[in-house]
Image: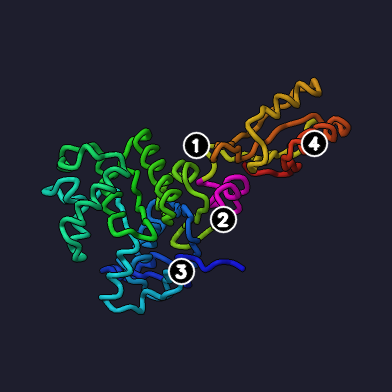
């Protein structure tokens, strides 16, 4: 029996009215996010991903459709009930949104003070969270005295202050350098594993998805183009939108057809194999060179995902032996005819 998703979105639509008419930001969105997921939502600029995450906690009211949190349709709640629900859905932003006149400690205390928690209890909670995000020594520092990564850590601590069940991250690492991004993602993963908090990450960077997420939805032109486990999307992207995001930037799409003295085969790495140099070992095994026409593999949680297209001689006996060798390594291998990479 499948457990109830912590967040479920059904037939959600969002339309904005502008001076030039109606703009459809989201169309027929259906999603399920399970308890404990680190769920990525990725798309190009303007695809609708930030609008979608703001609809999850009703910062943006959907034009139609339903948003469920633990089975409860939150669009039906009154303002007092909705405020309580929002406390169980922490949110962090690209630009941190810290109060510049407050210290790090005071920024974390702020949502607790608003909800009626005593100053003493709020300070105790802030102390715990500063330790969790690794900034116990910066409690009295103001945002202007903190680096970008430190500001985002304080923003994460503030979002955790009310013990949320879900943490919504809207482009939370877009303003950070790669090293700082990696440290923030590691922190979010630690929070997910240590506290059991479901994390939803909005991003336009596939590297963020591969570093931290277990499931991903690809949004394109205001609609969900593809959704699934990260390793499945990386190894077998089904839609053009997914392929554009998975394939490396600037990769030229080429057509490979079996012809003449050569055939083409696609090797799929789906996590069953390690980073053993299988192609190089195969060449040594059969003392026959192969030509690598295209390669895109990634390391996700220490496993290889992606694909390689190789060109092999037309000899049927040699091909069969090579295919048998590759499949014995638990790799998926298929002949390519009119392959578009």
Mark 2 and mark 1 in contact (Cβ < 8 Å)?
no
Which sits in the foreground, 39 or 221?
Answer: 39
Q: Who comes first in sequence, dot 3 or dot 2?
A: 3
Q: Quadrant of the C terminus?
A: top right
Q: Quadrant of the N terminus?
A: bottom right
* Labels 1, 3: front one: 3
* Residue at x 80% of width, y 36% of height: 323
The 10 Å Cα crowd at callout 1, few under 14, some 14 to 19, many 20 or more, is few
* Disc on res. 106: none
| Residue 9 place in picture, x, y as percent | 46, 69
* Labels 1, 2: front one: 2
The 10 Å Cα crowd at callout 2, few under 14, some 14 to 19, many 20 or more, is some
* Residue at x 38% of width, y 43% of height: 187
SS assignment at label 1 = loop
Instruction: Kindly identify which residue carries mark 3.
Output: 9
Instruction: Kindly identify which residue carries mark 4.
Output: 323
| Residue 134 place in picture, x, y as percent | 30, 39
Q: What is the count of numbered marks?
A: 4
* Residue at x 66% of width, y 29% of height: 276
Mark 4 and mark 2 in contact (Cβ < 8 Å)?
no
* Labels 4, 1: front one: 4
């Amino acid at each position: 029996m499948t457990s109830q998703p912590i967040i479920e979105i059904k037939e959600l639509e969002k339309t904005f009215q502008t001076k030039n008419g109606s703009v459809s930001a989201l169309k027929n969105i259906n999603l399920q996010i399970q308890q404990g997921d680190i769920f990525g939502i990725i798309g190009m600029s303007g695809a609708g991903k930030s609008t979608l995450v703001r609809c999850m906690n009703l910062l943006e009211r959907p034009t139609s459709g339903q948003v469920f949190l633990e089975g409860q349709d939150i669009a039906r709640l009154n303002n007092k009930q909705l405020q309580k629900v929002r406390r169980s859905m922490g949110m962090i932003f690209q630009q941190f949104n810290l109060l510049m006149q407050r210290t790090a400690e005071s920024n974390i205390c702020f949502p607790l003070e608003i909800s009626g928690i005593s100053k003493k209890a709020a300070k105790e909670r802030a102390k715990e969270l500063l330790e969790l995000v690794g900034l116990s020594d910066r409690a009295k520092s103001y945002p202007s005295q903190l680096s970008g990564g430190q500001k985002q850590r304080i923003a994460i601590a503030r979002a955790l202050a009310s013990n949320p069940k879900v943490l919504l991250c809207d482009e939370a690492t877009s303003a950070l350098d790669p090293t700082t991004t990696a440290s923030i993602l590691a922190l979010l993963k630690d929070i997910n594993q240590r506290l059991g908090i479901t994390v939803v990450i909005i991003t336009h960077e596939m590297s963020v998805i591969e570093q931290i997420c277990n499931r991903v939805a690809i949004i394109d032109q205001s609609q969900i183009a593809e959704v699934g486990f990260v390793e499945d999307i990386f190894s077998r992207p089904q839609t053009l939108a997914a392929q554009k995001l998975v394939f490396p930037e600037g990769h030229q799409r080429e057509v490979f057809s079996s012809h003449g003295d050569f055939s083409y085969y696609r090797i799929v790495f789906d996590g069953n194999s390690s980073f053993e140099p299988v192609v190089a070992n195969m060449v040594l095994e059969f003392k026959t060179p192969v030509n690598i026409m295209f390669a895109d593999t990634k390391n996700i949680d220490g496993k290889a995902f992606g694909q390689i297209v190789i060109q092999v001689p037309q000899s049927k006996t040699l091909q069969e032996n090579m295919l048998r060798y590759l499949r014995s390594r638990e790799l998926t291998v298929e002949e390519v005819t009119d392959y578009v990479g």
